[in-house]
Amino acid sequence: MAAVLKRRMPGGRTRALLTGLGGLLLPGGFLSAAIPDAARADPRFTLGYLVVTHYAGVRSDGTGDATAGLQQAVDDAYANDLVAFVPLGTYRISDTLRLFQWRPLNADGTQAANPYKQKSFQVAGEHGPAGTRPLLRLVPTAATAAGFADPAKPRPLLLLRHFESDTYPNPSRTVPADVMAAPAGWSIDTASLFNSCLRNLDFDCGGQAGAIGVVWPGAQGAYVERVRVDARGAHAGFYGLPGRNAGAIDLEVAGGEYGIRHGYGAAQAAGREVCAGVTIVGARLTGQTRRAIDYVDFVPLVLIGFAIEKDFAAPGAT
């Protein structure tokens, strides 16, 4: 027997979903078989939430390495129009979690339909007592440590990207050694990265000199809300935030060379993190050694309600 379930989508829209034997039916077929049975059986699943702790290796007690399981959970949530839901706890990761959209070319050289029309990344943490949130803590392995060691080539814990193909046949969808760069044959396009939302999570950069907490340079409908980054000993808390009438609410960064980097001045390639203006409502930036905010864009930053306290006494402070 099937039943109709209504789920709220980004932008306040609702979508009617048909549930039945074997899972949830969406346009185009059944949900991915990769979704664990325990996740399907979780009562939050019918509300549109994919609980990440049902994936192998995703432990909330701060042990093990949750990177692979979290990556799979986020990918499955994106593919199936679900919210990747992170319960309270501490999760160790050893490398960047990559939230990538790809827009290939058709054989005639025209662009394929933009995936934002149907897809967006939704990542949310549980709201706990007294405002506690889940924590993702970077603990690099011997294989990944070098990638987080150089502030001249910073590497994030969480990276949101929209890539557009430059040529046909479409190039391979690879991850470059510099994860902040575009793969060969693809270009970064922040103007087409709509509706992806990150909310209610904390990040710990683990004192790695080249680490960044979050890279989230989205466009209309995208936002970052209630996110704290412990960037002590690291490069930056945020490196690119949603613009184009989008923005962020209630951000906090402790430490780092920078609290928030954005735009031409922050980019390692021209325009990489440019988002045509960012609005931030509520920011607490403390203990940065260089700049609390490093912002160069062709549309001004709007900052409403903030507390900034720079660490002039730190070694290397400028």
Image (spheres, rainbow, N blue to C red):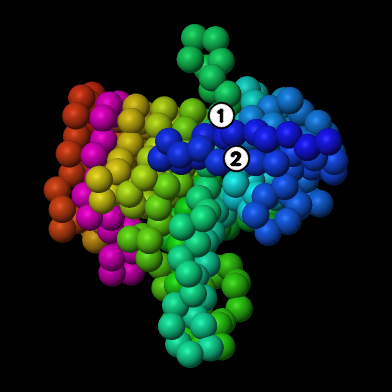
Question: Does 44 sit left or right of 255 as displayed?
Answer: right
Which sits in the foreground, 47 or 297? 47
Toward the viewer: 19 or 247? 19
Categorize mark 2 by other alpha carbons within 10 Å: few (<14), some (14-19), many (20+): few
Give the Cα distance between marks 1 and 2. 24 Å
The image position of residue 133, as x and y in percent, is: 54, 22
Disc 2 marks which amino acid?
Ala
The quadrant of the picture occupied by the N terminus is top right
Identity of the amino acid at label 1?
Answer: Gly
Height in image: 147 above or below 13?
below
- The one nearer the camera, 30 or 249, is 30
Q: Give the foreground label among 1 and 2.
A: 2
Q: Which residue matches tag 2? A: 16
**Could you say which is closer to the camera, residue 22 or residue 255?**
22
Question: Which range of residues does the magenta coloring cover?
Answer: 267-284
**Residue visible at 38% across and 45% down?**
222
Horizontal and vertical percent position of residue 142: 69, 53
Marks 1/2 in contact by CB < 8 Å: the verdict is: no
Q: Position of residue 310 (x, y in %)?
A: 24, 31
Q: At 51% across and 83% down in the image, what residue appears? A: 106
Q: Which mark is residue 95?
A: none
Residue in the image at 33% along x and 49% along y: 220
According to the picture, the residue beneath numbered tag 1 turns out to be 125
- Mark 1 surroundings: few (<14), some (14-19) or many (≥20) residues within 10 A: many
